[in-house]
Amino acid sequence: MIDVKNVRKNFGGFAALKDVSLHVRQGELVAILGPSGSGKTTLLRILAGLEFPDAGSVLFDGGDATHVAARDRQVGFVFQHYALFRHMTVFDNIAFGLTVRDRASRPSKAEIAERVRHLLSMVLLEGLADRYPSQLSGGQRQRVALARALAIQPRVLLLDEPFGALDARVRKELRRWLRRLHDELRITGVFVTHDQEEALEVADRVVVMSQGQIEQVGTPTDIYDHPATPFVYQFLGNVNSLSCVIRDGVAQVGAFNLPAPIRAGTQDGSGVAFVRPHDLHLMAPSEGGGAAAVVRHVTVLGPLVRLELNIGGEILEAETTRQRHAELQLAPGQSVVVWPRQVRFFLDDGWQGSSRLDGAPNPALRAAL
Amino acid sequence: MSAAKSSVIPGFGPTLGFTLFYLGLVVLIPLAALLLRAAGLGWGQFVDAAFSARVLAAYRLSFGGALLAAAANVGAGLLVAWVLVRYEFPGRKLVDALVDLPFALPTAVAGIALTAIYAPNGPLGRLLLQAGIKVAFTPLGVVVAMVFIGFPFVVRTVQPVLQDLEVEHEEAAVSLGANRLQVFGRVILPAILPALLTGFALAFARALGEYGSVIFIAGNMPGLSEIAPLLIVTKLEQYDYAGATAIAAVMLVAAFTLLLLINTLQKWRHARLHGG
């Protein structure tokens, strides 16, 4: 269990963390998600004792650990670039945390060998004990780093962009494996990532950070379905951001005229509205109403087709299926009609909400607008 | 030759040819001439010239002093390199530039300066004499001069390696529970050991061959504070070319053996590390 209370940290004049508070439950795997410079790594390093906060406190299992040195924290830390000791074999790397203990608490040689063997089998690297890090692949190195961190039986496992340096396929494999491993060990873990897919797939809960502050904490589904701020919405997946003005029951969102979202209080207002690329419905001009658009660019990505559309001078991104792509025979320069199926509003007065506009608008509504 | 085929930049043949030609011209031919000259002596004469009591004492001082000085420079050089790499302080660039001065200074100037400071009536020498330590005109003075001229080597070989050393490794060790001594001894030192060894070898070789700065402070008492290079010069001044080359040949072989040993040590370590 970790408690972070009102932690602040400045580097020179730069505020890396501004009043951050966070609770991590026992046995939970939490992802800290944010762009670079959001303070996520600083927060992780403060948890590890590699950095100390200017104000606020850090508690492990209820005990104050704010000023406890890294070597006394019993925290397992895994670095993005592994930080394996190059001059040591895999065995010696994993055993390092045990062999540096003082004589009184150091396990015997046989015990150390036994524990290293156990860890090696856990990270699926049996038989590689005598290799040097330079003889291993990236994925293997990261698993050695994980085994090394687990060897000291840490109270908390911290991982800094653990899969950041790996190629896409290995990354996917490794994060599923980490999830399974965590389900087995049930160790309290925090990992930092800038990859939203990774955070949503691996973590029990996700902490979204931006500019030294926590934007939202929640389960992956929570975060994705009910983003608390425009930042979270934009950060989770591709999105088109449009300015919007609501007046007299009509929401003008970019080039779209939509029925205003139903909400309490005053009806008029302005702010931003977001439309996910896959929520932009494409039609032939004869098929229905919406905003006229011109296709600028078509990219086929496996089963999906990504399009760049010019709608009234604004460039929007849309996604559609291969089938729809074939039906409409989409090509650069072609005119289409676009209708947003779902729009998320964040208004300046603080109101936010989604508006579902399934299907193409009926001609009557269109006439009314 | 397989290296030539897989190489990005072609020209294995000409470059190796040039390397051998150049090495031959600059290093091997003069040394061969030296050995040839020494070989001109009969065995008995050679032993007399190269292994008399006075010459043996000079070897002892030259090799012993150079080893001691190189060892001292490993410690001091590592510390200076560490400070220059790890800390930001005003005047760091200036200190960094100062390190190279022993390279640039004419060795005679260095010798005279050191002698002036460490002589019994010099500012430092007087204080040390009160403590019962005599530096100038003793073997200790020889070592001091050798430390001076060998100093930049260790700093300059270790500095870039320290610079590239990722702090992450130290942080990893600390978070695994290592104390400072363990971090240094088990993580940092192994990483910089090859550079330290190279620096040691260079400082040693430089100190061994040093002449100008040493002879001023040494006092050059036969059998006590006389270095081998001085003996060679002395013999040359007496037109005893064969005797001079005999001593030179012995020094050459000994120095070469020692440097080869250090290089082999490096190779062995490298192979062990990278699974060679």
Image (spheres, rainbow, N blue to C red):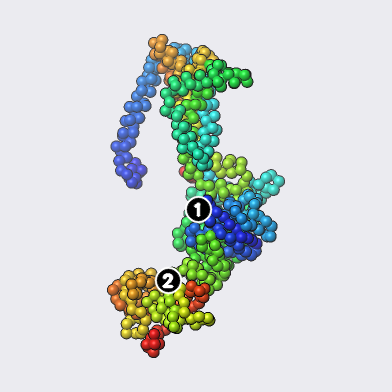
Where residue B26 appears, x then y in whole percent?
Answer: 34, 27
Q: Residues within 10 Å of mark 1 (few under 14, many from 20)?
A: some
Q: Residue at x 51, y 54 (%)?
A: A14
Q: Amino acid at mark 2?
A: Ser
Name the foreground residue: B224 vs A270. A270
To which quarter of the image does residue B101 belong?
top left
Q: Which residue is mark 1?
A: A81
Residue B23 is situated, as x and y percent measured from the top left of the image, at: 35, 30
The one of A184 and B147 positioned closer to us in this rendering:
B147
Q: Which residue is mark 2?
A: A241
Mark 1 belongs to which amino acid?
His
User: Would residue B5 be found to the left or right of residue A14 on screen?
Assistant: left
Considering every residue shown, the one lying at the far right of the view is A104
Element under disc 2: strand
Q: Position of residue B81 (x, y in %)?
A: 51, 37
Residue for point 35% across, 76% down: A325
Evaluate whether residue A252 shows in this view: yes
Tell me if A248 is positioned left or right of B139 in this view. left
- Residue under the point 54% across and 62% down: A213
Picture quarter with the N terminus of chain B: top left
Q: Can you give x and y, in whole percent of width and height, for residue A75 in the image?
A: 62, 54
Mark 1 / mark 2, whichever is N-terminal: 1
Mark 1 belongs to chain: A
The image shows a total of numbered marks equal to: 2
